[in-house]
Amino acid sequence: MKLFVTGATGFIGQSFCRIAAERGHQVLGLSRNVHRPSQDSCELIEGSLDKVPWGKVRAFSPDALVHLAWLVKPGTVNSPENEALMAQSAKLFEAAVGAGVSHIAGTGTCIEYAPSSDRLDEETSPLGPETAYSRAKLATLGHLKRLASTVHISWSWYRIFYVYGAGEHPDRLSASILQRLSQRHDVVLRTPQSVKDYIHVDDVASAMIWGLERNLNGPINIGSGEGIRIVDFARAAAAVLGIEADHIKDSQPPAVDPFPVTVADISKLRASGWEPQVTLQQGLRGMAALL
């Protein structure tokens, strides 16, 4: 396939482009910074969601658009920029159809779902976005569905759970835990008992590519299918580093987590033959090796 990818030099984008190329796909990546280190197999063009060089995209003649670009810095879940990105994404989808794509793959978030202690299922779990980020993502999905029904293209919407791995923003929880523990500083966990579904960035990328190759449509959860308490995640990081677990502290009192349990039901992906490949220990070791 020929894939046009936004956010190609971002956290997930770099893994996606590398793995797609390894699987024999041609990738044209859109990035604000084409000078950022990237895979040799990914052709990069400079631009942003509101300034796409569509002439170059049409010359590439992509089969599918993979839309990864969005805010990535922690603390931006209620930024008004999310609404602007929603509007830019809607225009991106329309222009991509004009450039000849037959499939659009968007990326959503697990917090589009309403809080639930049950595994979250694409077809049956209720939605209940509570942040500007999740509301903008869900509205973007609405734009995609309406467009697809009008112009009769296929679409997929990948709801990504708690992705981690080398190259993530240093302020994200997993990166900050490893960094502080490696320096033998205490780590204070705000919600130590919260249960999250952590999935390695390479597994996220491979799941998306797997779905594209098999023309999976509709909303698709991307997670490990297993939950782990944040305190146990931190202890696993300490074990990988060979650091004493007594550096891990609970905040007093713990903060209230609006999503105390967030675990994916990945039956849809598993039914197609996909399984996550990177264990938590492998993923943490890969991050620790770069410290």
Image (cartoon, rainbow, N blue to C red):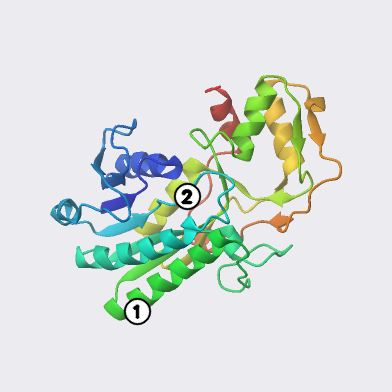
Q: Mark 1 is on which residue type?
A: Ser
51 relative to 118 in the view: left or right = left
Residue at position x 48%, y 58% in the image: 82
Task: Say if 146 sits above or below 213 in the image.
Answer: below
The secondary structure type at the circle numbered 2 is loop
User: Residue 49: horizontal and vertical position, in percent?
Assistant: 33, 54
Query: In this rendering, is residue 157 above or below 291?
Result: below
Asked which quadrant contains residue 264, the reply is bottom right
* Residue 215 visible from this viewpoint: no
The residue at the far front in this view is 80
Q: State yes or no: discs 1 and 2 in contact (Cβ < 8 Å).
A: no
**Going from the N terminus, do you reach mark 1 or mark 2 first?**
2
Classify mark 2: residues with Cα within 10 Å, few (<14), some (14-19) or many (20+). some
Q: Nearer the viewer, residue 261 or 208?
A: 261
Which residue is outermost to the right?
Answer: 253
Tell me the amino acid under the disc marked 2. Answer: Leu
Q: Would residue 226 be found to the left or right of residue 200 on screen?
A: right
Residue 249 visible at all: yes
Residue corresponding to mark 2 = 71
The residue that mark 1 highlights is: 149
